Image (cartoon, rainbow, N blue to C red):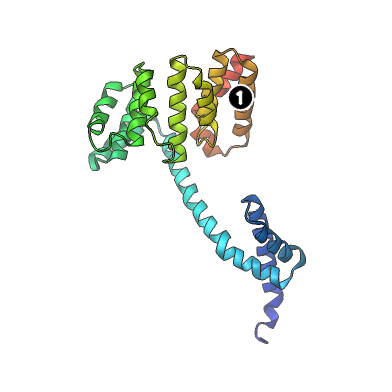
Amino acid sequence: MDAIQPYLPLIFNVLRGLAVVGLVHAIVTRQQIFWMFLLGFGALLGSIFGMLGALAYTFLVLIPSLRGSGRVAGQAVSRGVEALKPLDTRIRDSQERLLESDTLENRAGLAALLARAGRRDEAQATLDPLLSGIYADDPVVLLTSAELDLARGNPAEAEIRLNAVDLKTSAATRTRALTLLAQAQEAQGRPQADATYRDAMTAATTEEPRARYAAYLIKQGRTAEAQTVLEAIAKTESRATGLYRRQEREWFDLASGLRRELK
C-alpha cells in the first residue's frame, strides 16, 4: 500500500476523468439510469463507489461500444470511398471482382451499376443467372430486378418484386426497397406513394428518400410541404461530415436544384 501511496492522486484523477467521460457517453447513448447515477457520483462527488463504477462502465460498456462503432465507421468509410469513384471505374472494378469470384453480391452489384449507367441489356444479362436459381428470392436480387423494371418503364412488375422483399434484412435494404416501391407506386399514380415515401424516410440510411419525396411533393403541388423537407435536407448537409456530403452528393444536389425551382 505504501508503494502506491504517491500515485493515489493520479489514480484518483484518472478514475474521476473516466467517470466524466462515461457520464457523457451514457447520456448520449441513453444508457440505463443506474449507470448515470453511478457515474454522476464519481464525476461530481468523487466518491470511491462512483469511481469504481466508472471503472466498471469503462470495461463493460464504453470500450465494447467503441469497438463496435469503429467497425461500423470503417464500413461506412469503405462504402463512402467506393461511392466517390467514377461510375465507369466502379463498373470495371466490379467486373474484375466478378471474374475473380462469381458470388451473389458481386453479380448483383455489377448489374446494379450497369443499370445505373443506362446499360440495361448488360445489366439484365448479368442478373439473369440469379433469377432462376436459389437466389431468386434474395433481397439483393429482388431490389436489382425491381430497379431494372423501373428503368424499363415497368413499375407494376417492380412493385410485385418489391412487395416480396424482407424489410427486416437490414436498414439499408429497408430504405432501398421502400424508396423503390414509392417510385413504382408514384409511376402508377397510386396514392399509397406518399405513405411509402414517409416510411422510407424513417431511419433511412441515405438522403435519397427525402430528396425523392420532396420532388414528389412538388409534382403534387404541395410546395409548402416540399420546402419543409428541403430545408431539413439543407440542415443535414450543413452539419454533415465531408465524407457524408460527398457520398450523398447526388441527393444533396437534387435537393439544391429543387430549392432553386421553388424560388
- Whether 108 is drawn above or below 260: the answer is below
Residue 259 visible somewhere in the drawing:
yes
Counting every numbered tag in the picture gives 1
Quadrant assignment for the N terminus: bottom right
As drawn, which residue projects farthest toward the bottom? Answer: 2
The residue sitting at 29% across, 39% down in the picture is 104
- Residue 166 falls in which quadrant of the image? top left
Amino acid carrying label 1: it is Leu
- Residue 252 falls in which quadrant of the image? top right
Quadrant assignment for the C terminus: top right
Residue 222 coordinates in the image, percent (x, y): 61, 15
- Whether 55 is drawn above or below 65: the answer is below
Residue 145 coordinates in the image, percent (x, y): 33, 27
The kind of secondary structure element at disc 1 is: helix
The residue sitting at 43% across, 15% down in the picture is 188
> Dot 1: few (<14), some (14–19), or many (≥20) neighbours within 10 Å?
many
As drawn, which residue projects farthest toward the right? Answer: 45
Residue 117 visible somewhere in the drawing:
no
The residue sitting at 23% across, 35% down in the picture is 133
Query: According to the image, label 1 marks what residue?
Result: 230
Residue 174 coordinates in the image, percent (x, y): 45, 35
- Residue 53 falls in which quadrant of the image? bottom right
The residue sitting at 35% across, 27% down in the picture is 161
Residue placed most toward the observer, 146 or 244 = 146
Residue placed most toward the observer, 127 or 90 = 127
Residue 216 coordinates in the image, percent (x, y): 53, 18
